[in-house]
């Protein structure tokens, strides 16, 4: 433990003495409080006295009472310590202090102080460095592009890695990126990519066609078991034609392969390198359980990022911090820029494990859950006004066709028709605030019609472990689509980590996969929409996926914060953000 930690423990021990500034206590009692020897206690007290945090007047004789006088009251003392923790960037210690049983007024002030730690900051002894500190209320999972599946992690991976192509969803065109050009053969079965020269990985190695080949082979490797392995199934052969040309031979003509080459799963990694090293605008400086630190890649092959450093810190879910891109306090009086609005593409949903022999195989049972999960009522009762009740993965469809009225009577009648006999059903979901609230609401409502649900929250870090949810009957989950909507839709059914992919089985799975394959080969935009409509209609009619809600976000940014445009994941492109300085 650090000296600060010992001092905090002493101050918190005062709660048993009504937080008085003077405490009478024996050395042995102090040793018990701080869990160390009497000899170490005397050393610690002398060091604290040298810091002028307290005065220690030892009692005469062994076992006699000593007097500790703190130089600042409990509020001032803890605030000072809290500031020191943040100045030393010991965010963990600061967060742990917030978890203590402190008086509410002190805890509120500590929360406010933590707020000022996040957001935009300028650092550097000689040259100014632009640093953005962002809080997150959960631990990050993998950032490996071959495995990344969660929206925020996908966004961060996009800052670290690059793909051969990029897809412009608005214009419906592919643009050159790591590949400066590409050819498609007349029969559509051979695609050749011409790589940029001089592109460097973060470790200083120059990118060549061998790295692209390695990336593809790693994705295809059965032993690696990437959830995106399905994207390699169409490839017959891959050849490096020189250092900067690579050619893919396909089993059949499909433009979708170009979409694959723009997806994060195909982001190029250096040959035989397992660390988080890419060619992207930011490199990984540090990645631990509590923090991800990204630094600007000064050798980026395109325009360098304006921000120098980005820090993403994990904080407790109940911490009162909600800042992402805020400016320093001195900029707080300026006029706000344009508001950025975002309505989640994709939706939260319930799906059923058809691989398990249970009552969920019965349509009437699934219909009972459909009527039981009244989203309009849940939004009202839980006061979740930033949600839009969903009937589709696409918010525009949900707005056109809002959910029909649902009643407990309908749910109870369907439950009775299913032959349900009181068995306990396991419902899994991410162990996060919103998911817990949704699951608890559903459980309570289910009890009112005699349905027994057992809730199984699991951490996001267990997302890729199939055994964690294999015995579940249902799951409450969410899917947030990336900007490439058609690819994201296909991924929803093909990606091995997707619970719709995991839980569908039998004829239902065969039917869905057949239409998804047709969608994958279709180039006409209107026909693509028809296929997606057909799939959603099938899932809804058979109550296989029950859409619950879309999340609505609205964010006002200071006028000085430039180039902020949120993607469908709710994040801004870090490379493009910059701060317009005040001109005096």
Image (spheres, rainbow, N blue to C red):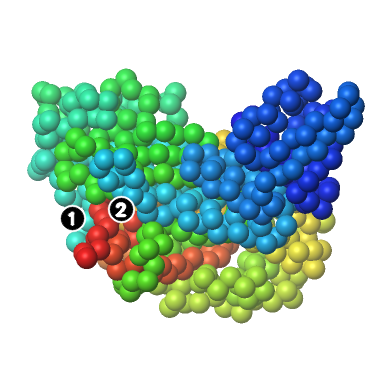
Residue in the picture at 69% in, 76% down:
407
Position in image of residue 345 (x %, y %): 41, 62
Between disc 1 and disc 2, the foreground one is 2
**Residue 196 seen in the current view:** yes
In this view, the residue in front, 130 or 168, is: 130
Q: What element carries label 2?
A: loop
In primary-sequence order, the first of circles 1 and 2 is 1
Q: Residue drawn at (32%, 30%), measured in percent from left and top?
A: 277
Q: Which residue is drawn at 29% across and 68% down?
A: 559
- In this picture, residue 170 sits left or right of residue 361: left
Q: 356 above or below 226? A: below
Q: In the figure, residue 414 lies in which quadrant?
A: bottom right
Q: Is 174 above or below relative to 125? A: below
Residue 90, how many percent across, how many down?
Answer: 53, 39
Mark 2 highlights which residue? 573
Residue 407 sits above or below residue 141 on the image: below
Q: Which mark is residue 173?
A: 1
**Whether residue 230 is visible:** no
Residue 494 in the image: state x and y as whole percent.
42, 45
């Amino acid at each position: 433990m650090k000296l600060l930690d010992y001092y905090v423990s002493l101050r918190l021990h005062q709660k048993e003495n009504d937080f008085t500034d003077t405490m009478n206590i024996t050395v042995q009692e102090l040793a018990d409080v701080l869990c160390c020897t009497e000899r170490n206690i005397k050393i610690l007290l002398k060091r604290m006295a040298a810091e002028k945090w307290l005065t220690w007047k030892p009692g005469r004789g062994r076992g006699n009472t000593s007097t500790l006088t703190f130089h600042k009251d409990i509020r001032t003392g803890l605030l000072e310590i809290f500031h020191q923790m943040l100045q030393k960037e010991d965010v963990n210690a600061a967060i742990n202090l917030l978890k203590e049983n402190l008086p509410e007024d002190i805890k509120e002030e500590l929360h406010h102080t933590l707020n000022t730690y996040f957001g935009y900051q300028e650092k550097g002894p000689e040259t100014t460095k632009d640093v953005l500190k962002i809080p997150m209320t959960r631990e990050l999972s993998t950032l490996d592009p071959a495995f990344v599946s969660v929206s925020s992690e996908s966004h961060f991976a996009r800052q670290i890695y690059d793909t051969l192509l990029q897809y412009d969803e608005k214009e419906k065109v592919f643009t050159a990126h790591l590949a400066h050009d590409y050819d498609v053969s007349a029969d559509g079965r051979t695609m050749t990519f011409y790589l940029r020269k001089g592109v460097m990985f973060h470790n200083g190695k120059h990118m060549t066609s061998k790295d692209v080949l390695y990336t593809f082979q790693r994705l295809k490797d059965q032993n690696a078991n990437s959830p995106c392995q399905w994207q390699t199934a169409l490839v017959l052969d891959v050849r490096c034609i020189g250092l900067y040309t690579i050619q893919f031979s396909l089993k059949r003509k499909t433009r979708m392969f170009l979409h694959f080459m723009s997806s994060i799963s195909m982001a190029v990694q250096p040959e035989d390198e397992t660390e988080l090293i890419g060619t992207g605008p930011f490199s990984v400086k540090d990645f631990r359980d509590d923090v991800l630190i990204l630094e600007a890649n000064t050798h980026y092959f395109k325009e360098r990022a304006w921000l120098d450093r980005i820090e993403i810190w994990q904080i407790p879910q109940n911490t009162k911090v909600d800042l992402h891109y805020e400016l320093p306090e001195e900029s707080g009086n300026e006029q706000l820029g344009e508001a950025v609005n975002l309505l989640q593409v994709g939706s939260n949903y319930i799906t059923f494990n058809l691989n398990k022999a249970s009552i969920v195989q019965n349509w009437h049972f699934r219909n009972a859950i459909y009527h039981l999960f009244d989203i309009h009522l849940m939004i009202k009762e839980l006061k979740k006004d930033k949600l839009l009740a969903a009937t589709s993965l696409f918010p525009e469809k949900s707005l056109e066709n809002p959910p029909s009225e649902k009643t407990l009577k309908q749910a109870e009648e369907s439950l009775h028709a299913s032959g349900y006999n009181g068995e306990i059903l396991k419902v899994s979901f991410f162990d996060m605030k919103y998911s817990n609230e949704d699951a608890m609401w559903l459980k309570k409502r289910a009890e009112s019609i005699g349905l027994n649900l057992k809730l199984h929250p699991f951490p996001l870090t267990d997302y890729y472990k199939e055994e964690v949810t294999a015995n579940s009957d249902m799951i409450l989950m969410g899917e947030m689509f990336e900007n490439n909507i058609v690819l994201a839709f296909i991924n929803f059914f093909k990606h091995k980590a997707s619970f719709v992919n995991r839980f569908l089985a039998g004829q239902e799975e065969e039917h869905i996969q057949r239409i998804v394959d047709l969608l994958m080969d279709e180039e006409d935009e209107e026909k693509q929409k028809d296929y997606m409509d057909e799939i959603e209609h099938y899932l809804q009619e058979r109550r296989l996926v029950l859409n619950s809600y879309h999340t609505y976000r609205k964010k006002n940014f200071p006028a000085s914060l430039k180039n902020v445009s949120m993607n469908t994941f709710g994040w801004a492109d870090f490379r493009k953000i910059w701060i317009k300085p005040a001109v005096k």
